Image: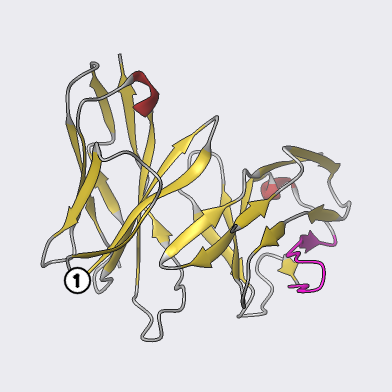
Amino acid sequence: AQRVTQPEKLLSVFKGAPVELKCNYSYSGSPELFWYVQYSRQRLQLLLRHISRESIKGFTADLNKGETSFHLKKPFAQEEDSAMYYCALGSSYKLIFGSGTRLLVRP
Amino acid sequence: KAGVTQTPRYLIKTRGQQVTLSCSPISGHRSVSWYQQTPGQGLQFLFEYFSETQRNKGNFPGRFSGRQFSNSRSEMNVSTLELGDSALYLCASSLAHPTGAQETQYFGPGTRLLVL
């Protein structure tokens, strides 16, 4: 079955601390993986996708096919990073979302 | 470019009624998808349309239906509303990749439906 798992509902860190938001997936084939972010009172928007291999707002994510993971990382969290983060798997013209992780960056 | 727009933004209905939600995609985007977002179930895929054809459908009852028009605008309809249909309904549009690979989806602000 195709599935995306985000084990943490809430991740709380202090400003300047490293952040890692976990994402594991279940998929047979070559996965297309995304991280979407929803800031307070804003619409859901793409943060990054694995095929672009670029860093957005200091965030990076590496696809690890052996561990079926696509964890999102940032070395130094900022208060403006506080938001809801969703990992998503693209398959058959749809996105399968994880349950989301709320990141809270404290001053 | 203007983003994805959805109307109405808020809606209150009673059980048994039906509702139609509308979505206008980003200009040039021919694929439109719909998702239901609830606190309990999270973001769940409803259906996807391209060139007026439904290419995929999620695991929802037949009360949920949709369509796409020749200008790529899309509507979804929910008949015989139930309390559990209360949710935020999100529309997303994307370019259609020629190989079928998943393109980035751009989301609208959503329509919040409350069923009483």
Q: Does the magenta segment cover residue A65?
A: yes
Residue that sits furthest to the right in the current view: A17
Who's the residue at 58% across and 53% down the image? A37
Left or right of B110? Residue A32 is right
Measured as percent of width and height from the top left, residue A48 is found at 61, 68
Q: Is residue B3 visible?
A: no
Q: Nearer the viewer, residue B74 or A48?
A: B74
Residue found farthest to the bottom:
B98
Image vertical order of residue B83 relative to residue A98, above or below: above
Q: Is residue B58 visible?
A: yes
Q: Is residue B73 above or below residue A102?
A: below
- x and y percent of residue A62 in the render? 75, 72
Q: Quadrant of residue A92?
A: bottom left
Q: Mainly helix, strand or loop, the magenta region?
A: loop
Secondary structure, mark 1, is loop
In the picture of the structure, the residue carrying the numbered disc 1 is B51
Q: Position of residue A23 (x, y in %)?
A: 73, 56
Can you say whether A65 is above or below A72 in the image?
A: below
| Residue nearer the viewer, B95 or A17 | B95
Residue that extends furthest to the left in the rendered view of this protein: B70
Q: Position of residue B85 (x, y in %)?
A: 35, 28
Q: Say left or right for A3 vs A45.
A: right
Q: What chain does mark 1 sit on?
A: B
The image quadrant where one finds the N terminus of chain B is bottom left
Q: Is residue A101 left or right of residue B19?
A: right
Magenta-highlighted residues: A63-75
Mark 1, other Cα within 10 Å: few <14 / some 14–19 / many ≥20: some
User: Residue B25 falls in which quadrant of the image?
Assistant: bottom left
Which residue sits at x=63%, y=71%? Answer: A28
Q: Residue at x 39, y 35 (%)?
A: B88
- Amino acid identity at mark 1: Ser
What colouring does the structure picture have? secondary structure
